[in-house]
Image (cartoon, coloured by chain):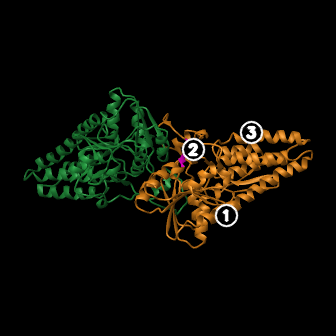
Chain colours: A green, B orange
Amino acid sequence: MRTIEWKDGVVITIDQTKLPMKEEHVEIKTCSEMADAIKTMKIRGAPVIGVAAAYGLALTAYHSRAQTTENLLVEIESCAELLRKTRPTAVNLFWAIGRVLNKAKQVHGNLENMVNAVVDEAQRMANEDVETNRKIGENGAKLIEDGDGILTHCNAGCLATVDYGTALAVIRVAFEQGKHVRVFATETRPLLQGARLTAFELKRDKIPVTLITDNMVGYVMSKKLVSKVIVGADRIVKDAIINKIGTFTVAVVAYEHSTPFYVAAPKSTFDLTRLSKDVVIEERSPEEVIFCGKQRIAPKGINVLNPAFDITPLKYVSGIICETGILSSAEFKKLAA
Amino acid sequence: MRTIEWKDGVVITIDQTKLPMKEEHVEIKTCSEMADAIKTMKIRGAPVIGVAAAYGLALTAYHSRAQTTENLLVEIESCAELLRKTRPTAVNLFWAIGRVLNKAKQVHGNLENMVNAVVDEAQRMANEDVETNRKIGENGAKLIEDGDGILTHCNAGCLATVDYGTALAVIRVAFEQGKHVRVFATETRPLLQGARLTAFELKRDKIPVTLITDNMVGYVMSKKLVSKVIVGADRIVKDAIINKIGTFTVAVVAYEHSTPFYVAAPKSTFDLTRLSKDVVIEERSPEEVIFCGKQRIAPKGINVLNPAFDITPLKYVSGIICETGILSSAEFKKLAA
């Protein structure tokens, strides 16, 4: 099954906060339920939250009782505003909302046409995401050599996308091609997407995976167990990659060990109008750090930081794997300029 | 109260696995109970496990029914063997056992003298540890400037020693001197000594502390929140510092940011006869990674790594703060040669 699916006015997804203990599917029927699912990270991962937002608008259009296209557009725009407020950092969210809104605005007069335009555009985006990821996988797999040890951080797998993944698509295609790989998945505190999701989906697909804590990155690199790093991205700006907290630490350690560090992401993640200093880095609840699952791990009243993302300057990036090919940092800079 | 105390043939300590949720004192009456407490990390931290091992031998001597010094020595040596098997990496354990055994061997004929020699030597080592740490604190505090942001990893505090700490002694003395400092404590997966112990003892002493996950090290350094790193050590060999897993990752990130990286440790941690490649790095149970406290966080049957320590080459070390002063890497190398 895809991570997210549309079925007759209902969106069906897997509650990622419950994995790997429980595979629980949830039905989302309104845009406000969708906003909540994104905010609480039942749905997470830059590419899939873009599609989820598009589906959120589709739910609004599909169930609307508006009598005119003008009124429907007002409803859709108000839902778009709600969705934009869920998570500030991943650009795919804003890109997807903009794309659906544009489609809606192109329809004039015919209500049914507008509803269909919105739902169809969301469906198209879901399908495109799968195709895009397959291409990212094929492009990136050319970099993978037999025997590679590949470190990945957080989850840039099928659960972060509609299907297949970005960083994990590269690994999946290489594995399908018969290359022997060993993946090191960092657990990715505080929400443990590496331990819960990456370990889960690679193990299910029988791709050899070893789980490590985030602070073992230096250890595995010093032991020469890692020949490449591949991560996803939430936003790629003119000067940097913005991705899950911890990515920058991994990048620095890889750089010091002369280990290539690749970013796999669709072009919808590119935000070539901004510099990293202009991007809001989401700060999430302190409770995520103070607790590990339901277990309190720190004294009451302790002060914590909880930025959800960090910034990796292009200096540390060996290449960006996207659906059209692999861009070196220099090529990306040229594109951005 | 000290972390560990001797009272009439009983050793009283705090169960560090239960902190900060519960402050539970345990009474240890036999050497085998002591070995178990070290192995399960009820007692942890290189300096204090040295003293704990000495007390373990003292318990054996104190409660022995041996009728001759020869027989008592056999008993003590067999307990020493048990203690040596608890944890392979921290050198203080072996140093402390050797020191007590030497004292015992110097006594001939008089059983009571031998018992007293062993118990007194263990007591002396506990007292010396406190004095040594105070001196480490005073020496290191000279490096601390008003307004410093200090990152520390794991727990090198009073709980890792008999009292006062090593890395945290430096911070304590600077704080007592009225310098304003802000400490960043990494949580230190898998066993969370940073979140559970460092956050606990600094908060109790009203020293400003902010808890971060291990993967936020790059983030706080890139934001220029950290002006110095101070960590402890489990063993300092000719070419490297061996300390809690994650130390090397912190050191590399500090190096890349030109942030001074200091190691605070007593000279009993020096092992100038060995290179890092000759030291056994303890590999602990996979369960420590698969669980966070009592909470399972990864799929069943997942492969994991769990080295308890890593190796930081001297290249990354700005200085070693010990009881006699601060050694630069170059001075340390000279000493080791």
B92, B304: nearer the viewer: B92
Helix, strand or loop status at disc 3: helix
Q: Which residue is mark 3?
A: B81
Q: Main secondary structure of the magenta part?
A: strand
Left or right: residue B315 versus residue A75 is right
Q: Is residue A55 visible?
A: no
Image coordinates for residue A135, horizontal then vertical, percent: 25, 36
Image coordinates for residue B262, horizontal then vertical, percent: 55, 57
The disc label shown at residue B79, or none: none
Q: Which chain is mark 2 on?
A: B
Q: Which residue is mark 2?
A: B308
Image coordinates for residue A156, horizontal then vertical, percent: 35, 42
Q: Is residue A253 visible?
A: yes
Label 2 to label 1, Cα distance in Å? Answer: 27 Å
Q: Residues within 10 Å of mark 2 (few under 14, many from 20)?
A: some
In this picture, is B284 found above or below B62?
A: above
Left or right: residue A89 versus residue B157 is left
Q: Respond whether the residues carrying marks 1 and 3 are from the same subunit.
A: yes
Left or right: residue A14 versus residue A58 is right
Chain part drawn in magenta: B307-313
Q: Which residue is mark 1?
A: B134
Please tell me whether mark 2 or mark 1 is closer to you in this view.
Answer: 1
Label 1–label 3 contact, CB within 8 A: no
Please tell me whether mark 1 or mark 3 is closer to you in this view.
Answer: 1
Q: Residues within 10 Å of mark 1 (few under 14, many from 20)?
A: many
B161, B286: nearer the viewer: B161
Label 2 to label 3, Cα distance in Å? Answer: 21 Å
Helix, strand or loop status at disc 1: helix
Q: Name the N-terminal-most of marks 2 and 1.
A: 1
Report the amino acid beneath label 2: Ala
Residue B309 is inside the magenta segment: yes
Residue positioned 21% across, 49% down in the render: A335
